[in-house]
Amino acid sequence: MTVPADGIDGKESHVSVNQRKKVILSGMRPTGKLHLGHLTGALENWVALQGEYQNYHLIADYHALTTNPDTSDILQNSLDMALDWLAAGIDPAQSPVFRQSQVKQHTELHLILSMLITTARLERNPTLKEQVRDLEMENIAYGHLGYPVLQAADILLYKGEVVPVGEDQLPHIEITRELARRFNAQYPAEPLVFPEPEGKITRFARLPGLDGRRMSKSIGNTIFLSDSPEEITKKMRTAVTDPQKVRKGDPGHPDICLVFAYHNKFNPGEVAEIRSGCESGALGCVDCKLRCAKRIADTVAPMRARRSELETHIDRVHEILRDGETRARAVAERTMDDVHRAMKMG
Ligand code: TRP
């Protein structure tokens, strides 16, 4: 029986036996321990999409070099991130978890794709412009300009069809689509080598950091998935609340309070009561924060338990990565055979 090309033309196939799952490529740069923003913005979705799709989970360690060539923390940061992924419920048996640097085809496809896009096109990338502004960079590295080309290689190497991303990444998905089209047009083959992947926005309402700013490890306004209940409570006490609610009894405005945003996410069963308690003044901010901290601690408790179990058997994590890398490499090699054949270089 032939495998139906479902997903490529959007039509459902009626063949269930051999039905091919759509391919999802999800990736993050290894920034170390993950925080609540990663959980609500990405990980929860990755876990939810696990059965329905064929997932690949990429640790984009080469991408980390685009803004900082220092590699002293990269291995530890990659392990920390892998631990949090596994703790959050990524099943490495279903979905390979692997480091970009260990699958050499990423760099090879990156090079080929880099011939199919102009520097002017890359300079127009709004995400790059924002980064340059935020990091106050005077000059950017050649490799940094090519960041989305490497990302396109990450996705296309696995013939990814869906990419779960935040909004800031959509320009990169657009570049990936352009590169897939350019490659297919320049090097036609039957069937065409690359699908055109779609970005799937998974980060809706962004959870703010404890100071109300964007949640970021470097700002230090985050709660880590691996934080203890005591650490969570301590951090939650510092959270900014409605400035007009100075003491218990003052009426508050939950819609502008970030602690309420956290309740919304982590304590949905009690939001109505918390809203009315806050608005009437009956609920003070300290109590409100303690209740919130408790819920967050309950949410992350099973992840912390799995994480510490894995931490004591870190060789298992190394083994998971090695296995993921072997499986990823096998797929990547097949794609590169298709690529070279289409280019008449193979
Ligand atoms: N650019 C992504 C980010 O900063 C990380 C990334 C690298 C990625 N390669 C990818 C995401 C491939 C999705 C698919 O978040």
Image: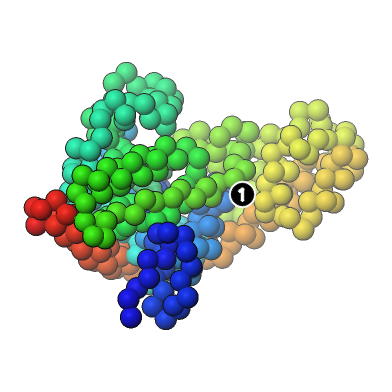
Residue 334: x and y in percent read 20, 63
Which sits in the foreground, 49 or 234? 49
The amino acid marked with disc number 1 is Ile
Which residue extends farthest top?
A: 138
* Residue 232 seen by the camera: yes
Q: Quadrant of residue 192?
A: bottom left
**Rendered residue at 53%/57% (across/down):** 45
* Residue 325 seen by the camera: no
**Rendered residue at 72%/55% (across/down):** 267
Which sits in the foreground, 109 or 338? 338
Residue 319: x and y in percent read 29, 68
Residue 114: x and y in percent read 22, 38
**Rendered residue at 62%/33% (across/down):** 211
Q: Report the residue marked by disc 1.
A: 232
**Rendered residue at 43%/55% (across/down):** 162
Please say if 183 is above or below 123: below
